Each structure stands twice: as structure tokens, then as C-alpha cells.
Image: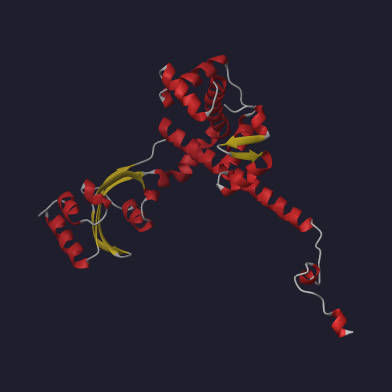
Amino acid sequence: MLNRKTIEFLQVGEQTIASEEVVPLLIGYRMLPQFFCEVLIDRAISKVSCTPEDIIFAQEQFVKKHQLNTETILQTWLERYGMTTEQLVALAVRELLIEKFKYATWESKLESYFLTHKSSLDKVVYSLLRTTKQEVATELYFRIESGEQTFAELACEYSQGAEAQTGGLLGPIELTQSHPTLAKMLSISQPGQLWSPIQLGGWFVILRLEKFIPAVLNDAMCQQLLNGLFEGWIQEQVQQEIGKMVKGEREKENSQPLTFDPYPLINNKTIQPAVSEAV
């Protein structure tokens, strides 16, 4: 378990880590952004309150989420993370406070944000077949168009991407997650529309829209938007803080007086001065 004494140092195996070494280690392990993120979140939610009923609900949700449904599993989990039961409760409440902060900050803006970004939130289901040979793609396209063979049959046999495992079927997926060229084609397609082969890099691709799923501002979408807005906001805050830290370190370095030794090697006695020889 961690306690107040570990503020001075941590013992990891045979290595003692002093407090002044923590930040350099966080930087070296690329953990500083995540550390800043958690600290900034704590600052953001510090003014958010919750009721005793909220605390009970938060604990129940936390236990359910992490499947801590027996005392043995709970104790194993606590030991794994070096936490006490009180710290677990605080962590559970923290997650609830974060959700409250999201709603308090962005709920009133969700509808306008959704309407502005709806086109990028629409989803599609489509079939894709790709091969490196143009003549093969052309032949397969005509087989599909004529009904000689199904798209799924040919994709399983000839497609050279991971989509071969699903008969070429991909999605539901947001349009923005597809290749920009494919996204543009799908956005103007009608369900069932088959596109003749197009070249994308080293591939020749056959595409067909199967289903268009317009985005709806339901509970799931609201949560998705809230999560996205929160993540974007917190990452921006983190970058600002890291920028301030870097700037501060540079200013500190620049404020150090510069010393110039015209004879560094001589003064270090690496070589001896030849003054006497010149006289």
C-alpha cells in the first residue's frame, strides 16, 4: 500500500526512487501526459458535488464494471493496484464526478454540435473487394454485376485484405473512419449501388453500399459526443500545461549565467601551456 512516506521516495525492488527523480522518470516513460491529464481532471471536478445516494450508486457501478462481485476478487484487485477500500470508493466516485462534469459543461451544446457534425457521424455498412490486379478486379466486377456470383463469394475467394474473412462486408462504421475516397463515394451512393473498380494506391477496389444508417441524437449518441468533447478538451489542457512546463525549463536554462573559459583544456591540465617557450 502507498502512504504519505512514499512522497519522499519509492522503493522498487532494490532501487530507491527519490522524489526529484519522479518527473524525469515520467517523461522518460512517456507517462507525463497521462499524469497531467489525471491531475487536470481532478482540478476540473473539484467543484462538482454528489449526494450520498450518488456515492452508493457509483460504488455499485464500479463493482459491476470491474466484476468485483466477491470479497476474494475485491481483495485481489485492491492488492494488485496497491489501494485501500477507501481509495477504491474515491475512485468510483471520481468516475461519477467526471460524468457529472461532462454533462454540466457540454449537455446544453450537444444538439447544435450534433447538427453541425451529423454528416461525419452517419454510419454505413458496405462491401469491399480489393486486388492488386486490374484485370482480375474488372472480371470480378462483371461477375457481380451480372449476378453470376455473389459479392460475398468472390470477396472470400479473391479479396486480399482482412475483409475476405467477412465476405467483404464492413461496418457499421462512421464515414469518417473510411478511406476519404471511399467515404465520398459511399456518401453519394444508394443502397445496393455497385461501383466499378477504382484504383487506390496499389489496390483495385470494388465497392458496394449495403446500408446507410443516419445518426440520431439518442442517449448513446449523446454519451459518444460528450466523451469526444471531454477528450478533446482535456488533451488541449494537457498540451497547454506541458507547453508551459517546457517553456519554464527553457527560461530557467537561459537565465543561467554563461561562463567562458578561453583555455578549457589548459586549465584542466590536459595540455600544458607553452607560454615560457614563447617568451
Residue 196 image offset from top left, x and y in percent: 23, 61
Q: Quadrant of residue 179?
A: bottom left
Q: How many marks?
A: 0
Residue 209 image offset from top left, x and y in percent: 26, 49
Q: Quadrant of residue 11?
A: top right
Vertically, is 120 above or below 196?
above
Looking at the image, which residue is at 43% across and 26% down? 66
Colour scheme of the picture:
secondary structure
Tell me the quadrant of the picture where the N terminus can be found: top right
Can residue 192 be seen from the camera position used here? no
In the image, is 47 to the left or to the right of 145?
Answer: right
Residue sitting nearer the eye, 177 or 86: 86
Residue sitting nearer the eye, 37 or 83: 83
Q: Residue furthest bottom?
A: 278
Looking at the image, which residue is at 18% across and 51% down? 156
Can residue 242 be seen from the camera position used here? yes
Looking at the image, which residue is at 20% across and 48% down? 167
Residue 192 image offset from top left, x and y in percent: 22, 49
Looking at the image, which residue is at 82% across and 79% down? 274
In the image, is 139 to the left or to the right of 110?
Answer: left
Tell me the quadrant of the picture where the C terminus can be found: bottom right
Residue 233 image offset from top left, x and y in percent: 57, 42
